[in-house]
Amino acid sequence: MKLWSRWLDLLDSEMDPRPLALVRIALPLCVIADLLRLFQLGLVDDVFTPFTLGGLSKFQSPNWVAADWFGAQASMIMLALTLVCMVLVSLGTWMRPAILIGVLAYAQLGHLYPPGDRAIDRLIRTALLILLFSQADRAFSLRRVRVPSIPAWPAWFLRYFLVLVYLSAGMAKLIQQPGWLSLNADPPLLRILVDPMAAELDPAFWAQFPWLFRWAGFGTIAFELCSPLLLTRHAHRFALIGLVMHLGIAVAMSLGMFSWGVLACYPLFLAPFILRRLDRSAGGQDPAANPAMPTD
Amino acid sequence: MRNLKAIGILFAAILLFWLGMPGVSFLSSNHLKTPGKQAKFRARWGEPWTTISIAGAELNRFRIPIAKSLGGFQPVFRISQAWHLYRDGPKTIRRMEIVVDGERVYRTNDSELDWRSSTFRNRRIRPMAESLTIKPRAGNRKGLGRYIVTAVREDFPESTSIEIRSVWSKRGKKESVHHWMSAEPPTWKLKDHTP
């Protein structure tokens, strides 16, 4: 019963709405930038058209059903819906319907072109669906009036989700490729970061420094396996390691919005730093005195 | 109401864990299923890893049918919870090369041969280029091949031959063409080649 009371207390806890609002703004911006990049490269028609009509991918998921409803214009309608809904979510206007419709349309684009719908797309959609249950539109929003605190459980749930992602990634690495912990084997991180198909580093040059990748690999595994620390009061300090890791990935690899999509959720972890900065720039009070701040 | 909400959130948290259970969700349903496979694993890895792995595989076989029935909503949102991310990198260095009239115009991650490199490096196109490079006659090669032929004919209207090569090498070793596709006028139809 004590455990249940603690669970109830956790779900009743409140937080400053701003970190969650920043996530609400940043996640859709990643999707918008990613889709606009396709427009910039002139790839929209090639990517979002079935192979039989001249598109790139021969395979569509059986869950690509928009064509049954909207006919030949289905992909463009889904694309427009995704973009409009993501803008609305980012602005905090009609957040809940926009998330629901936007995620459904975004998923249809993934069903239409499965090769380009990667883990980060799934992660963003899941995170957005968690935001659906939040009051993330209670700050930095065009529509709703800001309130001093909102229920904290959606933020906790999103943090828990990211911990599951990191833990799965770490354990899958370790169990399937013991070389991640080897002092002698070819470092898997070196292989990943010099793979020309996905990475930017020169294989010939960087192969001279295997120790660098070996230790960075140990660090990656340690961060992923220790990710439950992201649920503790030390999350903001521990998340700095994740921040560096994702920035490193963004520089060393060509994974598009991968790093930015994950980092879009980091305001939840880095809230103490961010709120202190926001309060200072607003000339407000010290956030350490703010009981609504999600520091634990 | 408070308790009901708490139960709902707890159920969602357990469901999320069950669908993407860290450490086992990437195992196949046949992993270490037979005594033969278990003996082979034991001979290589010994104990306690064999017992732990068999327990993980059994847990996964118990997990999968429940996850399938509980996670039936996932395709609607395309949010399957399997987070393996980068487990390992390839031992072989592979690159895609595009050759127009015998002259290379594109080579993966080469700043000098960078014709339309922004396109081929884009995160949505890269998986197509990757599968085309890894597998001869990859199931999805034709779409990208067709795109490349069309783009070459736009940018090099006088061209008379196009090759899309998959070049392989081990780190520090000489590279060679593993397989390729070619197209020529008048049909510009793609043909597969292996050495």
Image: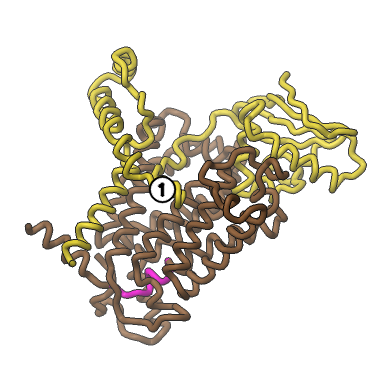
Chain colours: A brown, B yellow
Q: Quadrant of the C terminus of chain B?
A: top right
Q: Position of residue A16 (x, y in %)?
A: 31, 75
Q: Position of residue B108 (x, y in %)?
A: 68, 40
**Occupied quadrant, residue A5:** bottom left
Q: Position of residue A204 (x, y in %)?
A: 62, 35
Q: Give whichever of A235, A162 is nearer the camera.
A: A162
- Left or right relative to A31: residue A284: left
The chain containing the residue under callout 1 comes to B
Image: A141 above or below A269: below
Magenta span: helix, strand or loop, mainly?
Answer: helix
Region in magenta: A15-23
The number of discs equals: 1
Label 1 residue SS: helix
Q: Residue furthest left?
A: A1
Residue A196 in sight in this render:
no
- Residue under the point 65% across and 33% down: B132
- Residue under the point 24% across and 28% down: B55
Q: Quadrant of the N terminus of chain B?
A: bottom left
- Residue under the point 66% across and 48% down: A49
- The answer to whether residue A19 is magenta is yes
Disc 1 target residue: B74
